Image: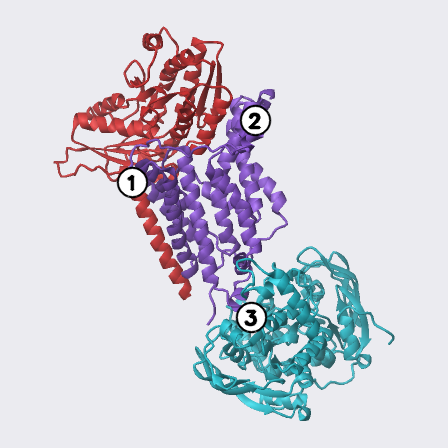
Amino acid sequence: MLELRGIVKRFPGVLANDRVDFSVRPGEVHTLLGENGAGKSTLMKIVYGLYRPDDGDVLVDGRPVEIHRPTDAIALGIGMVHQHFMLVDTLTVAENVAMGMRSSRRPLTDLDVVADRIEELGERFGLPVDPHAVVWQLSVGQRQRVEILKALYREARLLILDEPTAVLTPQEADQLFDTLRAMTADGRGIIFISHKLREVLALSDRITVLRHGRVVGEVDDVGAATRESLAEMMVGRQVKLAPDKDQARPGEPRLRIRGLRVQGDRGVEAVCGVDLDVCSGEILGIAGVSGNGQRELAEAVAGLRRPSGGTVTVDGVELSTASPADTHAAGVRYISESRMREGAIGAFTVAENLLLVDHGDRRFHRRGLFDDRAIEEHCRHLVDQYQVKTPALDTPVESLSGGNIQKLIVARELSARPNVLVASQPTRGVDIGAAEYIHAQLVAERDRGTAVVVISEDLDEVLALADRIAVIYEGRIVDIVERTDANRETLGLMMAGGHPTSR
Amino acid sequence: MRKHTRTMRWLVLGAVLAIAAAACGGSDDSGGGDGGGGETFRIAIVAPSASNDLAFTQSIVDAVNRVKDERGNIEVAVTDGTFVVEDAAAAIRDYASQGYDLVIAHGSQYGGSLQEIAPEFPDTTFAWGTAADTFGLDNVYAYEAASNEGGYVMGVMGAMLSKSKVIGIIGPIEVGDAKLYVDGYAAGVEAEDPGATVNINYTGSFSDVGLASEAAQAQIAAGADVLTGTAQMVVGAVGVAKDKGVLWFGTQSNQTSLAPEIVVASQVYHWEVILDQILDQIAAGKKGGETFKIDLANDGIVIEYNDGFDLPADVKQKAEETIAGIVDGSIDAG
Amino acid sequence: MSQFFSQAILIAAVAGGIRLAVPLLLAALGETYGQRSGVLNLGVDGVMLLGAFGGYFTVLELGNVWLGLVVGVGIGAILGLATAFISVTLGAEQGISGIGVYLFGLGMSDLLFQKLVGTPLPIESFPKVPLPGLSSIPVVGEMLFQHSLVVYAAFLLVPISTFVINRTTFGMNIRAVGENPEAADSVGISVARVRYATVLIGGILAGVAGAALAIDLGIFQQNLTNAQGFIAVALVYFGAWRPLGVMGGALLYGMVNSIVLQLKTLGIIPRSWSDIAAMAPAVITILALVLVARRFRQPAALAKPFVRET
């Protein structure tokens, strides 16, 4: 039903799509797989009329078409669920669905008619949502349903979903997959964009892999593919999806959290009484859907946010009311989830960013001034050791890729040989190769005797790294399980607030 | 970045247009040409409201133009509408540095600025009013109007004409010339008819015409059948008086044209009386240090009756007696 | 104090409050459309001034108050389109470009007045139209139902605007564009067209507000509006972007002003308090509306130009 032939799209300095061929048949899920920047989103924006291709043809039902704007795509029966929802928060579900459509009672709205249709479609495809609810009241999963309903209401025969599971709990993702299967059974085609290999394998009928804007692989027989084989196609070499690691040998507890309460930015309590112990030589994984208090917890431990109650003790020193500098001096290091906002200063150079935290260290000074030689030596060493790909030490950090910035931050924080390390979303937005490297470094840090906390929404990452796993939901730890006892389904259930059954 | 420069370009264009419009509207250079042998005397006026406000600003502009017509060989420049003091200060400084012989800062609110600027331009004479303070500077004249005197006379007339014996006065802010006039008018009413009620309402604004209009409505609701008011915003009140058929007394300029049916008389300022004195002093080499006052005695203040209004003879006679009394000192106008 | 509660004074206070509220209400309703669609137009006062002069001059020359109002509509429409061009097509910084429009209106209205009229001459005002039946209700009839048609029309615009914004597809598009223009664009709503329409409505209503003010006062003067356009913009914020809230704000502002004037006239507010009392309308209105409107959020895309990425 859709065919792309030789699509080329150039941006200044980048060839985003290089002669890409791609097609979708009715009733199939065709996955577009690739790393960040591989050109998946660009290709789909061309299909949806947000970008114009520089070369190549778009065919719908065998006929060449020009798609200048989203309305053209909609008219051709193409719908898109964007990664960032295209919903108006202050409007109701029905209004969002009706938006831009001709009303049967022009110039008045016909929201009751729309609401009936929404309920009908919702029932048919397993997308229950109240048409009269205002969007800001809905959960992320419900909002996604509204996006899909918007497309179905416009009689989309082909639906593009851009990273739809990134914001969902595992249970919500399963529900979404049921919906998508109902849609393919109805003869509709689906383009699924993801880099989560597990779900790609579970859902797809066909897979096309993009790398650097080019098609590098097509998988028609999904049953024969494995996560490893897909990852290899994406990266272009063999990758380890889980780091090699020995059995943890935990020592004494280094980080002790008791009854910790932390206020969020809006003054609501975001962490509501958390108890945790993290020992020397172990990685504690904290799993949870984002926004359940992870950031506040991490910032409280790192000394960046003053708790409203409870204690944080590192190696026997109470730090809950300490300044960031004191926390730092106690050997607590934090890899923040927002690397461009808190982790690095974009306009500063690589060297300056590497020195951002330790610029007061005596090693880097001589007679009251910076010792350029010592600094350069230190930075050169870190850049080499952590494989940060940068043209020079004086390159501004904002011109590096996300993966390299993250490696730089990891290098800076680990070079201080911390006692406690808190890593929040350490590989989000980072390509598989860099993620592999960062994972290995975190494990090495554990083996050096550091108490490591890894906070991640990605269950695969938590399962790959952690020795013990704590699940956080609405500011509370639901349960802590040994890695060996953990299974994906019960963790997923707990992430959605379900209580642990028997273990 | 591209968007930024584009925005800037349009902003600059808009600003230029706006400034051009403001500049054209704000000043009225009736320039007389400098080529006349260098004998031309150059006068600049900086004033808060419009030159044709039928009130305070118009009084000085009209006076300077009368002096110009009489004496000749005078060039006049006007910057009006400078209700923002900083704008006025900039204009005063500009005129001084352009070598104007006399810069008139027509607003008591400009005093602070003048005090700073005047010492920098010892060759220029500055005059400001209404005020009595020359700051001890020998190139600053101050001038004021005994607006209480005209107010008193018209207060006497108002008290005689009022049937309801309720008289309303509308003022801007209780300072300077406005306060003097309002108090004088009230004193006149009191002297003529101690039983009459005088309601005084300061709106709090020199420029809010709508508020002045509603103030007149309020006065009429409170029973007034004779109204007066001072400052440029009263044009709104005159309209209401006309609608409701109550009498009006004007001040600062002749306001008959606003409502010929109901304007009884206006107190008019003839600043040319003191301008003549100032120009003579300058010609004699004295550039300042003195305060002048227009009043009924020196004909700087004149009561102009509306010929179209059928003023009872006894009222007119009483008014003339009152004027004579103030001039000879037998009546104290407060 | 008791004299304040005399019938004549009360009637005058309420009727006066309504008269003072009308120009603000018209301008603020227009601004509400623009702001709901994400365009902040700070040039309202400039449009009002030119509308005021245009209306005044037309009545002065032609003697027909309704023609004056029509000219106000025309001037408002032209300036509305110009504002839309600057804010929407050029995507300029809306706060600063609005000040440009204001300064243009302030200077141009004065320039035209000086050149074309000179000395202020009074003009005819709108005839009062007592509503049959209603106007003969004691007290209330005199307060509410003995105004000009412009006054009734301005208040009629409140429910009409509420209906348009909440119940029509156009209104839904306005709200969508003001909250999330990307989302509206993605379903084929032309953000530019919606914003042109709302800014045009805003311009027309500002022009009408100015013309109505000048014709009602029967006079024009430099800076006649005395910054009422800026008060109107503030009323939109404090009225929480809802026509009813805006009306409440305009009425409150007008009423407090009118009551303060009455209290001053009667000497209930002593003269030494006069200047402080002059600030009461602004202070009371802001306080009241802040208390009411605190829980409302401004349109998320307010003052943000929309540029589709390509």
Residue C273 visible, this orientation = no
- Left or right? Give the position of A136 relative to B319: right
**Extreme residue in the top direction:** B330
**Chain purple in the figure, letter:** C
**Coloring applied to the structure:** by chain
Q: For marks 1 and 2, give the CA distance.
A: 51 Å
Q: For marks 3 and 1, give the CA distance.
A: 53 Å
| Coordinates of residue A332 in the picture (x, y in percent) | 70, 68
Is there one chain holding both mark 3 and mark 1? Answer: no
Mark closer to the observer (1, 2): 2
- Left or right? Give the position of A368 relative to B181: right
| Coordinates of residue C167 in the picture (x, y in percent) | 57, 55
> Which mark identifies residue B94?
1
Amino acid type of the residue tagged 2 in the rendering:
Leu
**Chain red in the figure, letter:** B
**Chain cyan in the figure, letter:** A
Look at mark 3 in the image and give the residue it sits on.
A353
Are the residues tagged 2 and 3 within 8 Å (C-beta)? no
Mark closer to the observer (2, 3): 2
| Coordinates of residue B134 in the picture (x, y in percent) | 34, 26
Label 3: chain? A
In which quadrant is the C terminus of chain A drawn?
Answer: bottom right
Q: What element carries label 2?
A: helix
Mark closer to the observer (3, 1): 1
Q: Closer to the camera, B291 or C228?
A: C228
| Coordinates of residue B103 in the picture (x, y in percent) | 28, 32
Look at mark 2 in the image and give the residue it sits on.
C10
Query: From what the image shows, is residue C31 above or below residue A475?
Result: above
